Amino acid sequence: MKKTETELLKLLGKRPILVWGARMTGIGFLRFARKHGIKVAGIVDSDPAMEGKRIFGVKVSLPSSIPSFRAAHKDLAVLVAVSIKEDEIITALRKFGVKEDECVRYSGFCGSYFTIDIVGTCNLRCPSCAYTVPGIKNPVGLMSYDDFVKVTDKMMSEVGLVSHVCLYSWGEPFLHPELPRFIERVHSLGVASAVSTNLSIESAEKIEKVIMTAPDYLKISLSGYYPEAYESTHTGGNADLVKSNLYRIKYFLEKHKADIFVEVNYHMYRNNIGEDLKKMRGLCEELGFAFAPCYANVTPVERLVDYCEGKVDEKTRKFFDLLLVGVDKGLEIAGPYNDRRCRFLSNQVNINWDRSVPLCCVCFDMKTATISQDYLKEPLDEINRKKEHHANCVKCLKYAIPPYLLGVNQAAWKKEADRVIS
Ligand code: SF4
Ligand code: SF4
């Protein structure tokens, strides 16, 4: 057993644990807890989309229920399992009277969160996405299973505790014919797996095989219910195919009794916040999937830097008209949160399909953002060291792009979106 696992188990002892964080990091801890017989009293998350959902059979509640958990469980410890916004949560816990020695920061035991982009392409060409940045032509390919085994072996040997592995970054993982095998490999290491998809996937058989392997978290990103809105921002996708696949997933979940947390991530634009939003929310309620609307933003860093420097092509400019929060306004909101220490840099390891390592998950151009040609050939410490003082970060930080991409200060985003709608 690795040292950090031992330390965490010792710290948690036999205490009942309340987990704050219902997304991937929290799910990663739940898999860890199940493996080690840790008693989980409950899960809380501030996102209303999560309320009432069940993860590994444990119900998700809002943080306002913390006092009742504390009253019901003597010796309760609250484990904060998030990849960002940890300090804000600790501050919120203080307000609930949770003392320092009753809090555990899971991040203190998981040095890095891993994202392995097993597919180096996508079947869609969304105008908000890195794949449509003019002038960036990354190589296209799939990670081999052998490479995946080597990469994950190295990952396990270099990091004390791996919470979870995301099998996607920019690419569409369902395009990989061996996706189920990759998921099984992650689970065989005692680690949780996450898959994100556009679900505009033609093969029902492929979907069923993935559901049978039960990735712990399945995120479906879309932007509308009806074809007109959806296909304007998920270019090349098919809205009706996506909807029929949502039903298929529900059917396969029940058929195979698969325990998967399914979340629909709904990108809000000016043209999909009326009937489209209402219908998709209703469909998710019917199917029992979490529904998480979010204001659409623009990626990657390279496109945003170009925009800030006055370089924007006509197609992109036209797409910007659909945003509820324009890029200028979004960057203005982000300004006061522009920490010198970028949170995309501090605790993430991203590995491309060809084993190269990008600076961060929001830079896309492999010509300028690659910091290691081969994850297998360099120690992780050395790779992390190369991230420091990277040229890309200078401009990115200058324009407050990291907090923009993190979507900090959602209240201000909402205020701006409400203003635009009215
Ligand atoms: S579906 Fe996702 S990865 Fe594919 S082009 Fe659209 S935003 Fe990019
Ligand atoms: S500052 Fe920008 S380019 Fe650098 S790691 Fe953060 S998000 Fe990536």
Image (tube, rainbow, N blue to C red):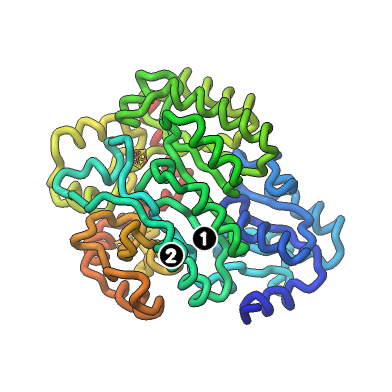
Image quadrant for the N terminus? bottom right
Q: Residues within 10 Å of mark 2 (few under 14, many from 20)?
A: some
Q: Residue at x 60, y 61 (%)?
A: 188
Q: Secondary structure at mark 1?
A: loop
Residue 361 figure quarter: bottom left
Q: Residue at x 59, y 57 (%)?
A: 187
Q: Are marks 2 and 1 in contact (CB under 8 Å)?
A: yes
Q: Position of residue 224 (x, y in %)?
A: 43, 25
- In terms of depth relative to the viewer, which is nearer, 421 or 365? 365
421 is higher (above) or lower (below) than 27: above
Q: Which mark is residue 348?
A: 2
Q: Earlier in the sequence, mark 2 or mark 1?
A: 1
Q: Amino acid at mark 2?
A: Gln
Q: Secondary structure at mark 2?
A: strand
- In terms of depth relative to the viewer, which is nearer, 170 or 179? 179
Q: To which residue does mark 1 refer?
A: 83
Image quadrant for the C terminus? top left
Q: Position of residue 50 (x, y in %)?
A: 63, 42
- Locate residue 246 relative to residue 36 in the image: left or right: left
- Locate residue 175 relative to residue 141 in the image: left or right: right
- Locate residue 310 relative to residue 278 in the image: left or right: left
| Displayed-image quarter of ligand 2 | bottom left
Q: Amino acid at mark 1?
A: Ser
